[in-house]
Amino acid sequence: MYPPRFRYLRAESTEHVLDVLAELGADARVLAGGASLIPQLKYRSVSPSPSVLVDLGWLDDLRGTSRVDGQLRVGAMTRHVEAGADDVLAEVAPGARDAARSIGDPQVRNMGTIGGGLAAVEATGDWGPVLVAAGGSVHAVSRDGERDVLANDLFAGPLLTTLRPDELMTEVRFPVMAGRSGSAHAKLMIRAVTALGSCSIALAIDAADRITWAGVGVGGLTPYPMSVPEAAAVLVGQPMSPELATEAKSALSAALGSHTDVKTSAAHRRGIAGSLFVEALDAAYARAAVAGVAPITEEGAS
Amino acid sequence: MIGDERVNVTVEVNGQQRSGEVDVRMLLIDFLREELSLTGAHIGCDSTNCGACTVLLDGRSIKSCTMFAPQVQGRQIRTVEGLADGETLNPLQQAFHDNNALQCGYCTPGMLMSATHLLEQNPEPSPQEIRQAISGNLCRCTGYAFIVDAIEAAAAEARGA
């Protein structure tokens, strides 16, 4: 399968990309890893079809992680496999590590990037729910300036972000939560191609083990990654209990609505969402509970 | 006009410099098969699922049906043709032969490249790790068990076990 004709340009720098996007706007698209965009181009489902493809593959300054100003910043061209192996990401956002390691299969993880995965807005994408749950954002740059877009405000619809055609996503930013925090990403998949859904949760607890903050994101169960503040609201201010989990799970179910498609029915989706929610909640809470606890020394527990 | 419609792609394949002048949309799998006559990598699904097109790019397994040829300019690729030494199968290939790890052989080059990548990263993989490593490669014939056995056997032999 082949996409419609386009002209190819290798990006030499971020500045070069911004110049091209400023000139061509929606006629151009950037190519990150290609793991999402190339199949879409081959299926001819990208609309409008780009006249120019700008290959970001050599922009090494868009790869890697750094900790700046209370944020963990992940370069948009960081491959999923690199994100999944990053120790800082694992510490700050363990749910993100879960997600990175679950995407697709080894080959797809070697090819795809966090920026490309977010920009593709595939219903079953993993980074969307993770970033939504974490209250994270993406950093977008253009000739007109820079801005941060909250994950909640990033997805306009299937395969569509709210970024302008002249904007380049350069970084994905996770807030570093102080104190006892944890996150987890639960996913249902039968091999890579039949990812049925995911639920991502990030939360923080206080010294009395009460939940002080929570974020909930779902993927694959709605047309595009979705935040579920209704479920998060049930959790905040409460100590963990099975009853709390059940109540929050009901709020999640109600919020999911009646999305049905060829893969599965609305009722099945609500069931999947509920199971994944409880799994992610238990794991996120367990991680928060041990966060900030002194590690066991070689001599034994202190 | 910005951009090119055709480019010259020069890439190191199995240790040799190879090149071709192609339409920028040419998929890497077609570049390997049609331009370079390396027909070991196969097209099974053309949709990023089956992994029959798997080759190694700068040491990492990738699906070549989901890459355009210009994306590998100046990089290093290894294909199944680079495994054997002349007529002598390498230990991984020999293990596939000895363990009945192929029937029709269509998935096999992709399996071999994914296994090669695994063993270079992890010389002592558990059966679960092996299954994870080949989770991007579909096989319709064998039921996978003998493939896992073959990879395990090759790893053991390499460790002198």
Image: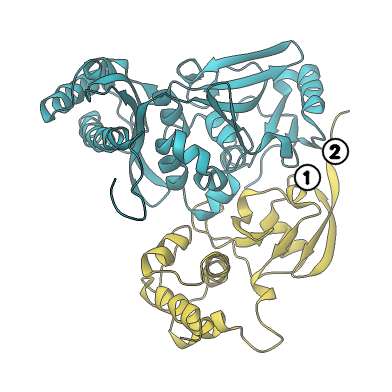
Q: Residue B160, image x and y in percent?
A: 50, 86
Q: Quadrant of residue A39?
A: top right
Residue B4's disc number: 2
**Up-down relation of residue B138 to residue A292 (above or below):** below
Q: Which chain is yellow?
A: B
Where residue B158 sits: x, y (%)? 53, 82
User: In front here: A87 or B133?
Assistant: A87
Do the residues under discs 2 and 1 have CB atoms within 8 angstroms? Answer: yes
Which chain does the residue under circle 2 lie in? B
Residue type at tag 1: Val
Tell which chain the image draws in cyan: A
Q: Is residue A24 left or right of residue A90?
A: right
Circle 2: residue type: Asp
Q: Which colour assignment does the render follow?
A: by chain
The reply to whether label 2 and label 1 mark residues of one chain is yes
Q: Dot 1 corresponds to which residue? A: B24
Horizontal arrangement in the rendering, residue B121 relative to residue A298 (left or right) = right
Q: Quadrant of residue B14?
A: bottom right
Q: Secondary structure at mark 2?
A: loop
Which residue is more in the foreground, B58 or A108? B58
